[in-house]
Image: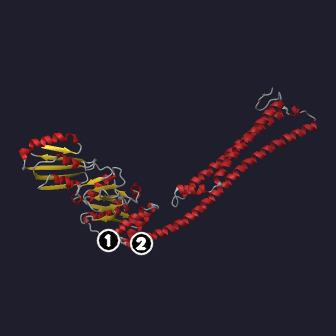
Amino acid sequence: MSILDELIKIFTPNHYDIYDSIAQTTVQILTNYNGLEISQIYKCLYKFPSKDRIDVRIRFTVDEVITISNEAATEEPDIRKSIEDLHETFLYEVIEISITIQKTNKNYCSIYCINKFNEWLLSKSHKEVMQIFSGMFKSGEENIRFICYDFDGLLATNTISFSKPDSETAYYNDVNRHDIISNSRRICNFYNHSQYDIIPDDFNVVVSSNVNSNILRLFRDIKIFLSLIYISDIADFDGDNINITIKGYKTIDYKIPLSTYTFKENQNVLYETYKWLYNGGNVHDKSQLARNIMTLHCKYSSILELDEKTFASINANYGLYLKENVNNYLNVKKDITAFVQSNIQEVTKAISSFSSDFKKNFFAFFSYFVTLMVSSSFAKLRLKDIFTPEITTITSCILAGSIIYWLISLYEIISKYRMMNKSTDSLKDSYNDILDTIEVQTIIEKDKSLKPNKDRFRNNLILISFFWLGMVVALFLALDSISGSNPLLFKFNIFN
């Protein structure tokens, strides 16, 4: 006996009606009053889940109504006294008793009479049922559990379960609802998506035992409707119809009336197509391929008449697409690898060129000063007499020219380096039709020699520049010291 039946039995009803829905359960009872065991009523109320509020209203007359609640146990003595005062007056009289259970659907939803709940759910249209479950998912739940207190069976979809209180939680969730809904927004323009936050898997029955066959049919039909929406280009609810547009090799439009819809076994292929479409891979490419095949097969028939042959064609064509993409991927990977190696060579050449410029500059200075020394030895001049005002000015100009030469060389090598990085970014964009940017970046980073070469480039650039500038500054200081009072192009007079 369920806890609700136990509560009803306490009142020995002549007649009663039960209503059960997502939000509340109500029971209307007519009985001949013959006294009430208040403690027994409270004892039964405490068996209900504490998250649900239960109010029992005992109506003797319009003005004489006594309310017993599972949230007001402290009132028990007062209620007992009120009933004792009315006992003699209403003994054996027909009274009305109403039981109202307000449900809090947090973590799970309580079902107290599965048959009445089924009646309530089946009285709704397909759209209303979808909105009911969508509202529950919008609260943030990834799974919905219904605990049924008078149901000796099991119903479980990928995300919804109906089971007894003492059964293990039966979630068969092998789907990522958030990713599927997010991907559907990219490939399907469903005008009513804000009202229907549900996916076909929510109604895909995985396990069922002792379940009302009409409920199974309801879930199956909704699964097919949602599958149609999720594989279409454009979809919307128009009254009691679903309008579907699929754009492939040609554009097809369908209006499917929900009230007169009749399921056929071949329509399971629509759910199979949906599962294939959203189960990994590039959802955009897969949707275009599937829609091309479907529009060809729908040339002389309705989309509801598609069968396994259509799905086989989709799979076969996708296999060819993958094979072509694998070949393209290998070619692209080869091209990217060659590009990376070319960049490494360019980096090596650039730093070698900069190093060569430094060497040329060094040997030019060396040759210049050796020539001065040899000339002075023949003329038997002292070192300070060699650097006449004219020689000092010429030497200063040469040193200044060296700094300008360093700046030009530095600008050229940095420009080449930046152009190389820009060409890498351009490479990522050029292969967007085959690989995304992250995949290209991964291939580039797999070449372990690229980063060390870039680091070596930066280190050598700093080191050579340091020696270059250090040499020029040292020569300026030395020239300033040797020239004495002779004017320099840039007069330091540090040592004078």
x 42%, y 69%: residue:
314
User: Which of the two labelled residues, at mark 2 and mark 1, occupies the earlier sequence position?
Assistant: 1
Q: Is residue 336 left or right of residue 121?
A: right
Q: Quadrant of the C terminus?
A: top right
Residue 404 percent coordinates (x, y): 72, 40
Asked if residue 289 lies left or right of residue 486, the reply is: left
Q: Nearer the viewer, residue 374 or 20?
A: 20
Q: Amino acid at mark 2?
A: Ala
Q: Nearer the viewer, mark 2 or mark 1?
A: 1
Q: Are marks 2 and 1 in contact (CB under 8 Å)?
A: no
Q: Residue at x 81, y 41 (%)?
A: 365
Crowd around label 1: few <14 · some 14–19 · many ≥20 (10 Å): few
Q: Name the kind of residue labelled 1 in the image.
A: Glu
Q: Quadrant of residue 114?
A: bottom left
CA–CA distance between discs 2 and 1?
Answer: 16 Å
Q: Position of residue 437 (x, y in %)?
A: 53, 55
Circle 2 is placed at which residue position? 312
Q: Residue furthest top?
A: 496
Q: Residues within 10 Å of mark 2 (few under 14, many from 20)?
A: few
Q: Position of residue 245 (x, y in %)?
A: 34, 62
Picture coordinates of residue 236, whole percent (x, y): 31, 58
The residue that appears at 78% across and 33% down in the rendered structure is 477
In depth, the one of 41 and 25 nearer the eye is 41
417 vs 485, nearest the viewer: 417
Please name the residue that numbered disc 1 is placed on. Answer: 265
